[in-house]
Image: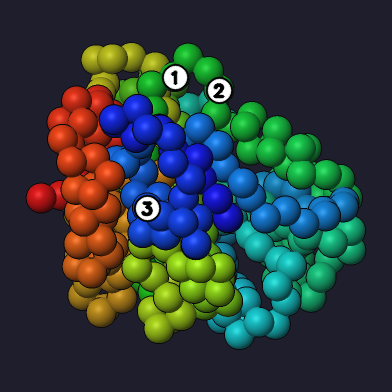
């Protein structure tokens, strides 16, 4: 709802829908390109107990996943049940072997809602952590998959809602991951599909808009997320090349079906990707205009290391 921002000049400004509205808009997706945000004011809501948890299945169940995922995305996009979500992942690890994990969550303390039963009923289950609990517990469960001390990369693309495409992208990941497991110490290679139904993308405009460039006109989408962890610096180049190879293959597969969406989710992007450039020409021009207005000397473009800069 509101940002407090220290500009490159040292001036402190407020940005919201009424004051410095262009800066407020740009900050919702534009990253660290305009100033140092020292305060966020957020719209909150009460959240009680939730239901959900991690379900683990053998990797041989992978092909069972894709049609239920598409059906879930379709139903969610139509507004069937706004309280449900699921993260679907394929984890390849020296430590645990190759597994499928589903993480359904329902934001009410009501077990086994109908929209999530295709995932909760799926067999054979190697582990099942479904419970009524709080958000902190779920956050800690996901954090447990991100151990300290490992080298790490992320890569991403956005695709349409199609089971055959999900299967093809899984197969591309599988063909890259299995050989790497034989020679990379401490490797964990995880491919995840996260639904972005139309009911979710509609919330951007409903809450003042942003610069991400996705809307219900794009249809129901999936964010494809590749996360890789390993131990040795000597493997950096090889695994970065493998991630680039995966992105290339997945992009070609989606493009061939006419299901490639331009959007690149910044938090999952490889350093070589261009998430700000994926927002569309109008939003990109807005970012450039806001940068020129609030940082005329381009301090945050030229002197601040890290982050994705605004493409020229």
Q: Circles 1 and 2: CB distance less than 8 Å?
A: yes
Q: How crowded is mark 3: few (under 14 residues within 10 Å), some or many (20 or more)?
A: many
Residue 291 seen in this snapshot: yes
230 left or right of 278?
Answer: right
- Give the class, few, some or many, for how many residues have Cα within 10 Å of label 2's Cα (few <14, many ≥20): few
Select label 3 or label 1 by which is in front: 3
Tell me where residue 45 sits by quadrant: bottom right
User: Which of these two is toward me, 295 or 81?
Assistant: 295
- Where residue 213 sits in the image (x, y, percent)? 34, 68
SS category of the residue bearing label 1: loop
In the picture of the structure, the residue carrying the numbered disc 1 is 150
Return the residue at label 3: 23
Q: In which quarter of the image is residue 138?
A: top right
**x, y (%) of residue 190?**
46, 42
Percent across and percent down for residue 24 are: 43, 54
Q: Where is residue 246 in the image (x, y as percent from the top left)?
A: 26, 49
Q: Which of marks 3 and 1 is nearer the N terminus?
A: 3
Q: Is residue 257 above or below residue 33?
A: below
Drawn side of residue 74 relative to residue 94, left or right: right
């Amino acid at each position: 709802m509101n940002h407090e921002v220290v500009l490159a000049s040292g001036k402190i400004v407020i940005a919201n829908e009424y004051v410095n509205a262009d800066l407020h808009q740009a900050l919702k997706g534009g990253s660290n390109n305009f100033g140092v945000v020292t305060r966020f004011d957020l719209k909150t809501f009460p959240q009680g107990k939730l239901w959900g948890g991690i379900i683990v299945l053998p990797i041989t169940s992978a092909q069972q996943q894709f049609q239920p995922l598409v059906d879930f995305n379709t139903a969610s996009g139509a507004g069937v049940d706004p309280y449900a979500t699921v993260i679907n992942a394929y984890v390849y690890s020296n430590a645990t072997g190759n597994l499928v994990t589903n993480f359904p969550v329902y934001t009410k303390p009501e077990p086994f809602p109908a929209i999530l039963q295709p995932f909760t009923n799926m067999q054979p289950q190697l582990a099942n952590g479904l419970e009524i609990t709080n958000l902190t517990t779920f956050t800690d469960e996901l954090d447990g998959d991100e151990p300290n001390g490992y080298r790490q990369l992320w890569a991403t693309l956005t695709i349409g809602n199609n089971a055959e495409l999900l299967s093809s992208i899984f197969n591309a990941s599988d063909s890259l991951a299995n050989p790497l497991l034989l020679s990379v110490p401490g490797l964990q290679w995880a491919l995840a599909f996260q639904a972005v139904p139309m009911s979710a993308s509609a919330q951007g405009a409903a809450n003042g808009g942003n610069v991400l460039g996705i809307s219900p006109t794009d249809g129901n989408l999936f964010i494809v997320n590749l996360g890789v962890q390993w131990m040795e610096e000597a493997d950096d180049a090889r695994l970065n090349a493998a991630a680039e190879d995966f992105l290339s293959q997945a992009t070609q597969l989606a493009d061939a079906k006419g299901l490639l969406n331009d959007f690149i989710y910044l938090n999952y992007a490889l350093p070589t990707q261009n998430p700000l450039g994926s927002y569309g020409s109008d939003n990109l021009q807005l970012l450039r205009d806001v940068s020129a207005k609030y940082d005329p000397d381009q301090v945050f473009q030229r002197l601040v290391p890290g982050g994705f800069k605004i493409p020229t």
